[in-house]
Image: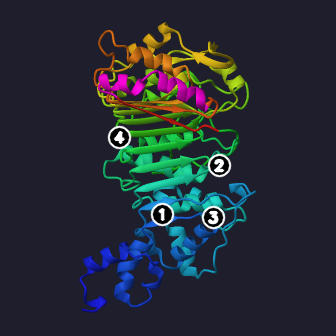
Amino acid sequence: MSLLGLPTEILRKIFYNLERPLTNVAPVCRRLRDIAEPILYEEFRGEMPSALEGYMKAIIRRPELAEYIKSFDSPTAQTGLSMTNQQIDFPWMTEEQHERLRNYLQDDIYGKGKCDVWYLSLGTRYNYEVVLGFLLNLLSTRVERLVLRTEGYRPYMQLVAEAAAKAQEDSADSHLFSKLRSVHLDDMKHPASSIKMDFVLPYLKLKSVACLSVSGLVEESPGPGWRLDPVVDGERIPPIQWQSDTFQVSSIVDLTLTRACMEADAIKEFLGRFVSLQRFRYEHRAAVTVHDHGFVPSAIIAGLEHSKHCLEWVQLERARGNEFLEEIIDNYNPLVSMKGFERLRTLIVGRYTLVGRDKRTTVQREPHIPRRRYSLEKCEAALAGLPTTLACLQIEDCRTSVFDFLNVLLSESGPSPSPNLTTMVLKFNGEEKKRIVEALWNEGEWRRRALKKGIALSLSHAFA
């Protein structure tokens, strides 16, 4: 049987598993093209703005291609250039193509005046963010996964998100972002381009989004500059305000915040909006100046109060940076009790976050070699706060002081404070001397003691 004689569903499965690009298959005949094109355009993943430019040119020639895309991963800026200085050159277009391009911008959603300005801005010299916002509008009825790499405040991208949030709030039948399930907002690790809270809030209001990841979140309001506000039925939609809006988020079950830098009250209030989280990861940005906000894990736990009945997986960590600065700005509070987290099964947490600061002492047999220690009171307090449902505990950024915590956990006298704990992993950082850690590990017979408690204990390290 020839290839063309196979049923369409079989051909589609073959094309999904082809190692060679489908661009070699599509030109063969109309039938193969109709099967291959939805797969070709299902996922957009551009490494450079030139990829976005090529995609826009294809959309202008054949607008039906936009209906195929389900995953959109925006390009990163060119090396040495700000995103606002990126340029996308449009091809020569016929009058019909110009009209089609303008009609993509819906006056009933954004307002005729704003759409006219938006359309004219597509052909300006610095139009990258304008085009990116235009594509979001174009894909808003089909896309399921969205990755946006952005610098600071982006008015056109925020315009689309706010309009979709407003439309979903007004009608359950709204088609704007109705299929969107996963959103990742990335500040591209640029120190001056942190993602502002106002840029994130519209995605919290989208009832379809179940997974949200934000890299570089800060709680400050947007800086000076103009913005576009959508218009519905002739009325301007005000921007979503950060602290005046008291809505709750029930659709998002998986939340990740990396390189975040938020004041304790702000992170507590932000997390307090979520009521259905099942997985949560928070990474505090490494300190750069004394004006940075310190890492306060107790505020994070307090903010998760409304999700503690359903949380199953939690990771809390602080990115390693200038330790001297961190000691100045960190207003350390204990992790506080997590006993109320009745479904928590996995906890990944830094040694500092779990037990607190340790003290430098010396090893008696080798006085010239420093060792860190924890007091018995600190270890007992940390253990008392762990939920009884916990099955897996992973401690990051360990020092030799973690053996004091382990000694209390694996005490042979009395019941285990975590009766359901079956797996425990200790991850040491590169500052600890390998031979000291290994000596303490072997002398303590930790693995044997752990097995008596029903715990599979392991050690990993990243020694320099």
Q: Amino acid at mark 1?
A: Leu
Q: Do the CB atoms of the residues marked 4 and 3 lie less than 8 Å apart? A: no
- CA separation in Å, label 2 and label 3: 15 Å
Which amino acid type corresponds to the residue marked 4 in the rendered image?
Answer: Ser
Q: Label 2 is placed on what type of residue? A: Glu
Task: Name the residue carrying label 4.
Answer: 251
In this rendering, would 97 be left or right of 29?
Answer: right
Tell me the element at label 1.
helix
> Dot 3: few (<14), some (14–19), or many (≥20) neighbours within 10 Å?
some
Judged left or right of residue 252, residue 359 is right
Q: Nearer the viewer, residue 272 or 12?
A: 12
Picture coordinates of residue 47 (x, y %)? 59, 63
The quadrant in which residue 67 appears is bottom left
Mark 4 nearby-residue class (10 Å; few <14, some 14–19, many ≥20): some
Query: The residue under label 3 is which amino acid type?
Result: Met
Secondary structure state at the residue bearing disc 4: loop
Q: Which residue is mark 2?
A: 151
Task: Find residue 430 and report its image quarter.
Answer: top right
First reached walking from the N terminus: tag 4 or tag 3? 3
Q: Establish if 212 lies above or below 450.
A: below
Counting residues from the N terminus, which is met first, the one under dot 2 or under dot 3?
3
- In this orientation, does residue 337 appear? no
Q: Position of residue 413 (x, y in %)?
A: 33, 9
Magenta stretch in the rendered image: 434-455
Q: What secondary structure is marked by label 3?
A: loop
> In screen coordinates, is 459 left or right of 324?
left
